[in-house]
């Protein structure tokens, strides 16, 4: 797969560089020869059929999954088995999950201040101010003292985004952030993500929200069978897909 | 006043229906009776049968309990007072009260010492059990084990002081180096504590006065319910941290730590407690260098703690397994290290899930402390079976004595159970 054309770049600074990365689950080859360079400020949407390895790919970036071969460099730090590097990368890379994964035993505010206080060693008061700032940004400051179980799915996902932002990450990973939500709530989460994109956050997003991809992505990547099959600008990708596999996939998700 | 337009399919509600009070048969006392006691004819029959059974039990036991004699000095005297009437001779409890509580060898002039330790126990346990209390009270909790030891065993105050100093030294070293490298801090802490304790072994005999403030009482003189309380409280409080460590060890990525945990847990769980107690009592002495005396109570505490921590480890492992994988991943993705994610995210939730199981083990352990009566320690049951029933005064008062033991254990265990239910309600945050 050729590198992305220069016109797609928003800057020359490399945020994530993945070279020749391979991963196996036991004997199953989930990711095959992945080469991907993400530039600072880029918004990338990764799509593909289920089981194509797209979630595994972004989970390798913050070492939630271990890759067996190849090289991943995030923000100048090479991902190795050294736990120091892993923790450093994780504190710079925010992640939102399909099922939010908020901490149910802590209030919304505590969810947001926990990592800044313990990982960044920020004083509690300051961490709370930052947390309230980001909760306002995702438009739920009034829920700060509630527990995650009291919030709707959309609200929980927005809290999860705020929780990641409180660590002031330079890169955000989204793993199907709207797949577990009711249709009514998808928009509020997407709006938050669009706002984040407009502020120049580097984002990698696994999603099936093609409207979102058209609106904010610089680049759409299509994966199948653990390989990157096609990547292009959104307009080109949707209007003029090159590979047959991409055409079939697009006809299936856009056809109805 | 329905605003439904029955004749048309299209329909728009114009007035909202206000909520009305439930009919009297659904709410209130009548409703409760109907729902719970007399829902069907079969239910009503069962209710009446159950009430009759309760009446029979009470009719038989209440006169026996209420007509009990409290003030005689022996069973023969009690029978004279009763004159053939069927009633309890509770006077064995009043006459042998001190023996039941403190054993028969603890010096009577020092009964106030364990009693004070018992009262202070509530003060020390309060901030641990009720975490809304001010955190500064935990300072007393930290001092309490050493204070209680000094009160109950007496002797030179320097022994518990140096024991505490060893722990403080260990903690200081751990705090100093544990941040950079957990293993260095942990092993360094243990080494520092050992150094202090070995030094203390030489220093304490030198500086201890021959006439200490609280005269020493030997372990073999401990007995009665006091012994059950000592064993129960110490073993429960020790087995919880050990159980957590074993449960985490069993999940560890490091094979050596995992295997050690698995072997320990499986071995201890596969052996009856009574066997371990016999080992503590008899067999251990063969392995120790001749001439060393290793306190029997300490040996028993080690065995019961090992036994209970293996069970608690398995209970907590269940709690750990019940947590969704996403919780681990979310903690990891925020950059929390292993110790932080365990302490702040995983264990608080896993322990909450494990509360019923942990209480189960704790209550069982507390009752199992009566097994020490088999290895000739005179705990509450040992006192009853031994010195009291064997005495010519009280030979034959089984019901009163064992009833009393049951009541004491029931109060304690029921208290633990009620506390745990309160705790579970207090920790509920899922709002389902």
Image (cartoon, rainbow, N blue to C red):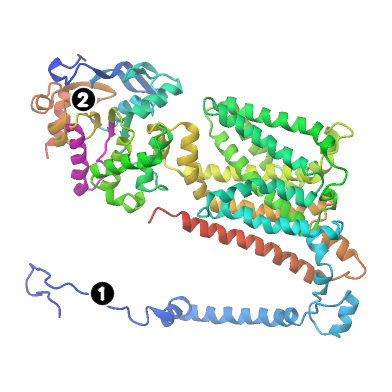
Left or right of B10, for residue A226: right
Q: Residue at x 80, y 36 (%)?
A: B204
**Residue A193 among magenta residues:** yes
Quadrant hosting residue B29: bottom left
Q: Is residue A102 visible?
A: no
Asked if residue B47 is positioned above or below residue A206 in the image, the reply reads: below
Parent chain of label 2: A
Q: Quarter-wise, where is residue B248 in the image?
A: top right
Q: Measuring from the top left, give residue B178's x and y in whole percent.
A: 55, 29
The image quadrant where one finds the C terminus of chain B is: bottom left
Q: Pointer 1 indicates a residue of which chain? A: B
Write the residue at 32% across / 33% down: A95
Which quadrant holds residue B316?
top right
Tell me the SS state at disc 1: loop
Residue A227 included in the magenta stretch of the image? no
Q: Tell which tag, 1 or 2, sits nearer the viewer.
A: 2
Residue of label 2: A41
By secondary structure, the bulk of the magenta-drawn segment is best described as helix
Residue bounds of the magenta highlight: A173-198
Label 1 sits on residue: B19
Q: Give how far apart the Cα atoms at labels 1 and 2 are.
A: 55 Å
Left/right of residue B68 with respect to residue B11 in the rendered view: right
Residue A209, above or below B49: above
Nearer to me, B294 or B129: B129
Residues behind callouts 1 and 2 on a single chain: no
Estimate how packed mark 2 is, as few (under 14), some (14 to 19) or many (20 or more) residues with alpha carbons within 10 Å. many
**Residue A201: image x %, image y %?**
23, 29
Residue A185 appears in the rendering: yes
Q: Residue at 53% across / 79% down in the picture?
A: B47
């Amino acid at each position: 797969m050729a590198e992305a054309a220069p016109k797609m770049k928003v800057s020359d600074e490399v945020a994530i560089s993945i070279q020749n990365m391979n991963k196996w689950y036991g004997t199953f080859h989930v990711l095959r020869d992945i080469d991907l360079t993400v530039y600072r400020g880029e918004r990338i949407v990764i799509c593909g059929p289920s089981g194509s390895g797209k979630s595994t790919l972004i989970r390798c970036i913050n070492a939630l999954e271990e890759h067996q071969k190849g090289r991943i460099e995030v923000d100048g730090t090479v991902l190795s088995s050294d736990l120091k590097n892993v923790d450093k990368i994780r504190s710079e890379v925010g992640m939102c999950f399909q099922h939010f994964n908020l901490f149910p035993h802590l209030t919304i505010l505590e969810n947001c201040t926990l990592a800044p206080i313990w990982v960044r060693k920020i004083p509690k008061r300051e961490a709370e101010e930052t947390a309230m700032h980001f909760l306002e940004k995702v438009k739920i400051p009034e829920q700060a003292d509630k527990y995650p179980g009291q919030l709707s799915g959309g609200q929980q996902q927005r809290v999860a985004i705020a929780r990641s932002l409180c660590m002031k990450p330079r890169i955000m990973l989204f793993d199907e952030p709207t797949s577990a939500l009711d249709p009514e709530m998808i928009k509020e989460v997407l709006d938050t993500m669009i706002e984040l994109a407009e502020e120049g956050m580097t984002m990698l997003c696994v999603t099936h929200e093609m409207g979102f991809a058209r609106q904010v992505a610089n680049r759409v990547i299509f994966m199948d069978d653990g390989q990157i099959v096609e990547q292009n600008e959104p307009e080109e990708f949707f209007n003029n897909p090159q590979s047959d596999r991409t055409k079939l996939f697009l006809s299936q998700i856009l056809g109805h | 006043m329905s605003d439904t337009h029955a004749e048309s399919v299209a329909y728009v509600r114009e007035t909202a229906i206000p909520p009305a009070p439930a009919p009297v048969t659904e709410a209130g006392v009548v409703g409760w009776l109907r729902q719970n006691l007399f829902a069907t004819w079969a239910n009503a029959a069962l209710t009446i049968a159950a009430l009759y059974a309760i009446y029979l039990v009470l009719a038989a036991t209440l006169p026996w309990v209420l007509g009990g004699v409290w003030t005689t000095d022996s069973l023969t005297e009690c029978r004279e007072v009763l004159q053939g009437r069927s009633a309890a001779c509770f006077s064995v409890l009043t006459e042998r009260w001190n023996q039941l509580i403190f054993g028969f060898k603890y010096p009577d002039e020092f009964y106030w010492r364990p009693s004070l330790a018992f009262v202070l126990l509530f003060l020390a346990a309060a901030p641990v059990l009720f975490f809304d209390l001010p955190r500064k009270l935990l300072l007393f909790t930290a001092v309490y084990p050493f204070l209680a030891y000094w009160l109950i065993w007496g002797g030179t105050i320097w022994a518990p002081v140096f024991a505490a100093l060893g722990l403080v030294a260990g903690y200081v070293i751990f705090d100093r180096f544990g941040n950079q490298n957990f293993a260095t801090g942990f092993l360094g802490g243990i080494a520092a504590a050992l150094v202090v304790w070995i030094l203390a072994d030489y220093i304490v005999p030198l500086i201890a006065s021959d006439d200490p403030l609280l005269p020493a009482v030997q372990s073999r003189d401990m007995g009665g319910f006091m012994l059950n309380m000592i064993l129960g409280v110490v073993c429960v409080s020790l087995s919880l941290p050990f159980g957590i460590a074993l449960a985490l060890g069993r999940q560890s990525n490091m094979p050596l730590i995992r295997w050690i945990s698995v072997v320990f847990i499986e071995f201890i769980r596969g052996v009856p407690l009574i066997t371990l107690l016999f080992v503590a009592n008899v067999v251990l002495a063969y392995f120790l260098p001749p001439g060393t005396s290793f306190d029997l109570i300490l040996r028993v505490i080690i065995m019961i703690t090992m036994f209970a921590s293996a069970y608690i480890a398995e209970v907590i492992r269940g709690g750990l397994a019940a947590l969704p994988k996403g919780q681990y991943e979310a903690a990891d993705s925020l950059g929390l290290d292993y110790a932080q994610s365990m302490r702040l995210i995983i264990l608080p939730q896993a322990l909450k899930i494990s509360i019923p199981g942990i209480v189960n083990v704790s209550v069982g352990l507390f009752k199992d402390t009566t097994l020490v009566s088999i290895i000739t320690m005179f705990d509450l049951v040992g006192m009853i079976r031994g010195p009291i029933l064997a005495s010519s005064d009280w030979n034959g008062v089984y019901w009163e004595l064992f009833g009393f033991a049951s009541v004491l254990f029931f109060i304690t265990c029921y208290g633990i159970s009620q506390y745990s239910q309160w705790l579970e309600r207090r920790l509920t945050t899922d709002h389902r």
